[in-house]
Amino acid sequence: MAQERTGVATLKGNPITLIGPELKAGDKAPDFTVNKDLMNTVSLSDYAGKVKLISVVPSLDTGVCDAQTRRFNEEAAGLGENVAILTISVDLPFAQSRWCGAAGIDKVVTLSDYKTKSFGEAYGVLIKEIQLDMRSIFVIDANDTIQYVEYLGEMTEHPNYEAAVAAVKALL
């Protein structure tokens, strides 16, 4: 059974339980499998040799998640080809595709953790009570070592966009 962490996060002030370990800078990034679309999956190794900014959101259909994904889509233009910006949620791939089309998102890759939740468990962001992934940011270098982590203490808060982008730029 996976580790459960309590007292580290809330949803609108209510305590929630996170499943999985608390990762830190310097840790080897755990592998994961998520859906690119309904039938096809990708894993960490599909982005080998690139700096990865993983933006985790509970659902693209909420205000903060929408703003977070739009912000990183804007930032992507200045980061170059050696950076992969991945937004991971448990939204169905259909919903992710619809949302990206409507929002004009074309520089961020949206991936779905809906089927196995392997990302949520491996990165310590799966919310036990509602089976969504907790808002968080991971910057992983080209050698798959975590260089920056931000676990949000309150799910409805925005991440520190500037710090995440600075962590990516420091690796280029």
Image (spheres, grey):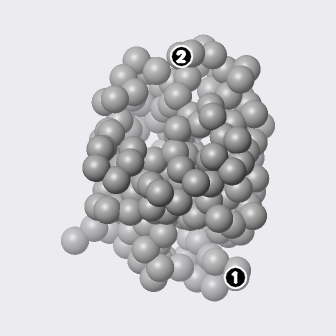
Tell me residue 107's x, y (percent). Answer: 62, 31
Q: Which residue is mark 1?
A: 13
Residue mark closest to the camera, 1 vs 2? 2
Tell me residue 74's x, y (percent). Answer: 75, 33
Is the residue 81 above or below the residue 126 in the image?
Answer: above
Q: Identify which residue is drawn at 48% across, 69% down.
A: 132
Question: Is the N terminus in the top left, top right, bottom left or bottom right quadrant?
Answer: bottom left
Q: Residues within 10 Å of mark 2 (few under 14, many from 20)?
A: few
Q: Identify which residue is drawn at 51% across, 24% down.
A: 51
Q: Identify which residue is drawn at 73% across, 31% down.
A: 75
For the question of whether residue 122 can be seen, the reply is: no
Is the residue 100 above or below the residue 107 in the image?
Answer: below
N-terminal-most mark, 1 or 2: 1
Tell me residue 35's x, y (percent). Answer: 36, 49
Q: Identify which residue is drawn at 34% across, 29% down.
A: 46
The three-letter code of the residue at mark 1 reads Gly
For the question of whether residue 171 can be seen, the reply is: yes
Label 1's element?
A: loop
Q: How many marks?
A: 2
* Image-quadrant location for residue 59: bottom right
Q: Which residue is mark 2?
A: 82
Residue 98's mark?
none
Q: CA distance from mark 1 to mark 2?
A: 38 Å
In the shown orientation, is residue 91 left or right of residue 43? Answer: right
In the shown orientation, is residue 80 left or right of residue 77? Answer: left
In the shown orientation, is residue 115 left or right of residue 16? Answer: left
The three-letter code of the residue at mark 2 reads Asn
Tell me residue 143's x, y (percent). Answer: 39, 22
Foreground residue among 90 and 14:
90
Question: Is the C terminus in the top left, top right, bottom left or bottom right quadrant?
Answer: top right
